[in-house]
Image: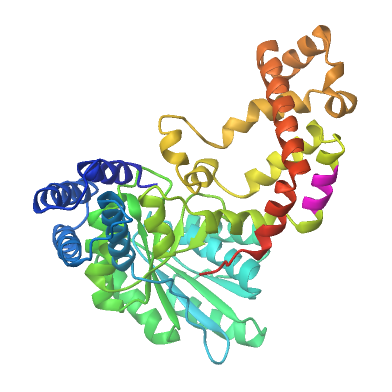
Amino acid sequence: MFDNLSSNLEKAFQNLKGEARITDVNIAETVREIRRALLDADVNYEVARQFTADIKDKVLGSDVLTAVNPGQQFTKIVYDELVATFGGEMSDIATAHTPPTVILIAGLQGSGKTTFSGKLARYLKQEHKRNPLLAAADVYRPAAVNQLKTLAEQIDVPVYSIEQQDAVRVAKEAVSMAKSLAMDTVIIDTAGRLHVDEEMMKEVAEIKKAVNPNEILFVVDSMTGQDAVNTAKDFNERLNFDGVVLTKLDGDTRGGAALSIKTVVDKPIKFVSTGEKLDALSPFYPDRMAQRILGMGDVVSLVEKAQKEFDEKEAERLQKRISSDKFDLEDFLAQIQKIKKMGDLGDLVSMIPGASKAIENADIDDDAFKPIEAIIYSMTPEERQDPSILDGSRRRRIAKGSGTTVKEINDLIKQFDQMKKMMKTMSKMGKMGRALHGLKNLPLGR
């Protein structure tokens, strides 16, 4: 996510490395490199110009802190400016005083509206205990209706659809149905086109007029850069939407749309989507995104994800097994499954401060666990519980069954033994218990 932008900003800060103080010369060089990094990331020219002008003014106007080197001061100022450019603070979805809350989803075809509608339904159901209804108002593409129904089945959420090509009717009847069934949220998935046209705009405006939504979300493919910003302007002029959803942030995203859209249309980014899985949706926190772009990681989001998969009882059970030297490959496999449920592996790694740079050229994805899982699944229960019994013949059998090599099995067992020793040492020192217990006491939900 924004890897090139992060790398180029880091290069810009190199101008201040080793400098004892901030001067007009190193300010000018650093600001010029930051502007170049932003433009290379496809940030709107006026946004990039204003961004760097504001940074320069703040640097020149800031008090020189003797305890902080110029690079750290400059980074802090850039961080503050990124947060402000992203909108300052997290923006929630509006809620109706009298249910149901009606959420209208708009955007171009291919932007990910239908998938986002399913993700939003899951998010509201899981995280906010809402009872949502999905409305299939993309009536021109049978595939869109079928896709929405398929997604809805996975999260056990009802879908309202009709045979006729009447999107306004779908929206109105879905709201009426939600009221009659005491459902508190209606999410309306509307039709899109390959480009902005009058027919599409007229229809979505009619839906807005018919149901008076509490929230209108504009979904945009973040990989389209400045095209996304221009489309957002067109939609906003007709719909006056409430917030933006950036999809496909796990792709080759340069960052231009994310950094430009709030300034250009003056509407907050409310959600970011990072994959096809239904749980790959997160509220947008400007401060956390700024931290990730500057290589500071996002520990808060990482802990939030961990808390959903690891409960306190499980942590205590795990610590006891580690302390008594009973932690085995069955336990290890279980922890791998929990980590995979937390989301995209590459995205998780990027949340760890400094990790992105440390593994800059590594190819990290969910497939990284597959050889390990295959090896462990090819073992007998006895072998998983006591890897010390793995002699040569057993290892050859496991290699054949898992499609790996004996060397890969040897490496896994060696690394597992090293990990066990480290975990046991930490447990004896009391660090692991405090770390696991401390997860639930961190100040989350900023």
Residue 231 image-quadrant placement: bottom left
Residue 214 image-quadrant placement: bottom left
> What percent of the width, then of the height, locates residue 444?
57, 66
The answer, for residue 239, to whether it is visible in the render is yes
Q: Looking at the image, which residue is at 29% across and 51% down? A: 69
> What percent of the width, then of the height, locates residue 132?
61, 74
Q: Looking at the image, which residue is at 52% across and 83% down? A: 95
- Relative side of 356 to 8, left or right: right
**Which one is nearer the viewer's eye here, 45 or 27?**
27
> What percent of the width, then of the height, locates residue 352?
51, 46
Q: Specify the principal SS of the magenta part.
A: helix
Q: Is residue 109 above or below residue 408?
A: below
> What percent of the width, then of the height, locates residue 42?
22, 50
- Relative side of 161 to 206, left or right: right
Q: Looking at the image, which residue is at 25% across and 45% down? A: 13
Q: Is residue 404 above or below residue 97?
A: above
Q: Looking at the image, which residue is at 31% across and 78% down? A: 239
**Which one is nearer the viewer's eye here, 273 or 186?**
273
Residue farthest along the top direction in this orientation: 392
70 magenta-colored: no
**Which one is nearer the viewer's eye here, 67 or 203?**
67
Residue farthest along the right direction in this orientation: 382
- Relative side of 252 to 152, left or right: left
- Relative side of 96 to 33, left or right: right
Q: Is residue 134 above or below residue 152?
A: below
How many numbered marks are there? 0
315 magenta-colored: yes
Q: Which residues are magenta?
A: 314-320
The answer, for residue 173, to whether it is visible in the render is no
